[in-house]
Image (cartoon, rainbow, N blue to C red):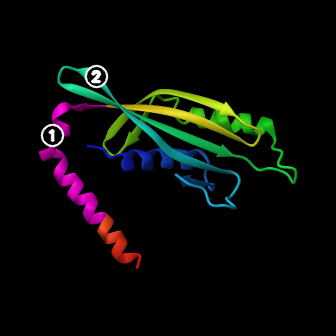
Amino acid sequence: MLTPTDITAAVVAAVGEGFPGETVYENLVPRNFARPSNLVELIGITLGEASPGGVELLYTYRITDFVEVDERHNSHLPLLDLRTMLLLGLFAKGYLKARDRALKVRRCTTAHELDFTETTAVFSLAYSRTDFDPVAVLPMMEQLTLQTKMKEDTSI
């Protein structure tokens, strides 16, 4: 089973490939963040019916593309439009590869502001209902707990 962390890593990698050399932030940007750059955030997961034996999870991401601004905080709108098209093109093939799975791209929509664009991308992945059985999920939860403890131990 893919975790949201696996899928987020795949989205970040795709954005990084589309804008090489630029910073791709996850979930938060620092106060004086770099421009141009992108921010990737998982903003929701929805459970849907796929078949009698399966379910579909919809993962909704917001990708914010920040462009350079001048001293009056104005940006170059044609450049912003081009970057938006490049961002949409990253998902035009219809799927996103994450580890050994391919998530279907359900939709991508954009909203423009003066110095950034927000793209909402929705990806879907089918699972068996048994994938959510506690016996199947417990080893994954134990592994995540171990990784978290290891990070805490090394960050002291």
Find the magenta span and give its range.
Answer: 126-147
Most common SS among magenta residues: helix
> Is residue 133 shown in magenta?
yes
Tag 1 near tag 2, CB within 8 Å = no
Amino acid bearing label 2: Glu
Amino acid bearing label 1: Asp
Q: Is residue 93 above or below residue 16?
A: above
Q: Residue furthest bottom?
A: 156
Q: Looking at the image, which is closer to me, 45 or 19?
A: 45
* Residue 56 x, y percent position in the rendering: 31, 28
Which element type, helix, strand or loop, lies under badge 1?
loop
Residue 84, by quadrant, is top right
* Residue 115 x, y percent position in the rendering: 75, 43
Q: Which residue is mark 1?
A: 133
* Residue at image point 52% right, 51% down: 27
Q: Which residue is mark 2?
A: 49
Q: Residue furthest top?
A: 52
Which element type, helix, strand or loop, lies under badge 2?
strand
Q: Is residue 140 above or below residue 44?
A: below
Q: Is residue 14 above or below residue 103?
A: below
Residue 150 horizontal side relative to residue 106, left or right = left
